[in-house]
Image (cartoon, helix red, strand yellow):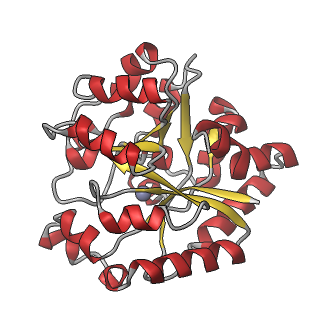
Amino acid sequence: MIIDGHAHMITESIAKSMKISPHILKYMNQEWAKHSVKEHVESWIDAMDKNEIEKTVFMATAHLNEDFTEFINSSNRFVGFARINPLLPNALDILKAEYNNSMKGVKLYATNDGFDVSCDCNPIYEYCEKMKLPIVIHFGMTIGGKSDLFHGNPVMLSRVLRDFPNINFTIAHFGAGFFRELLMLKYKQDNLFVDTSGTNNWIDYQDNPFSLKDVFEKTIKVFTPQNIIFGSDTRIFPGGYRENILKEQRGILDELRLSEKDKEDIMYNNAKKVFNI
Ligand SMILES: [Zn+2]
């Protein structure tokens, strides 16, 4: 069985509250916004059954959205992470309300929301530590109208990893361009994890050519297979479940001759352990 550790669910109301700017919208097929919550639930359950996925972890892209809450609570195979922007004056209240809505973790969009993970988030970290909530962070490159790469460097998390050793921090998409920094950050840090999600097209923007297989190989060496979480970054509409990503990444693990146990850890056990699900 598989746990998909990173996916999204976007309806029309979610898309609206994301306030995506027109110059970004033109890059996006907005079919995802045309479907009801019920259609999202049915399509996801269908895709998960077909691909032997036991649970999927959904990263919210809006705050306190009713569609998202309804979706997450419609099946015990769906796990929700709340989007928190610490620059909002009521960020902590949002987090507490999201916790009451059954969200099991926090997603921080450091680049999209343009905040400093080292200085701006202490009340969020304190609450997460108290409630044992894991945190996933998107650093690096991203599509987003207001995104600010200045705040996208995972190195900014260095002090936080030291000061909050009981919080499990996961960096999405191998650091989405800050791969070198991601690897350095792992040095003697037990509470740092990484997810493999998405197309990983950040590789195309690196100054020296390497492949996704190289990325996996190096990450396995530095992080060990016990600290890597599989994710597809699927939004079910349009295009359905990203089976191509699942297939490609499983193929790479086979090519790298990982043991069955290591493969199971990446595809299933690590998400269970790190996200407490
Ligand atoms: Zn994502």
Compared across the picture, whether 115 is left or right of 271 comes to: left
Q: Residue furthest right?
A: 260
Choose between 138 and 271: the one closer to the eye.
271
The residue located at (82%, 46%) in the rendering is 258
Is residue 96 left or right of 74 when viewed as pictured? left
> Quick check: can you spot residue 33?
yes
Q: Is residue 270 above or below residue 252?
A: above
In the image, 177 versus 39, the foreground residue is: 39
x then y, percent, for residue 51: 70, 72
Q: Is residue 135 left or right of residue 216?
A: left
Residue 92 as seen in the image, left or right of residue 102: left
Which quadrant of the figure contains the N terminus?
A: bottom right
In the foreground, 51 or 188: 51
User: On the rendering, which quadrant does ligand 1 occupy?
Assistant: bottom left
Tell me which residue sits at (23%, 23%) in the image.
119
Percent position (x, y) of residue 13? 25, 72
- Looking at this view, is 24 or 100 the one in front? 100
Residue positioned 20% across, 64% down in the render:
17
Vertical placement of 155 versus 105: above or below? above
Residue 44 quadrant = bottom right
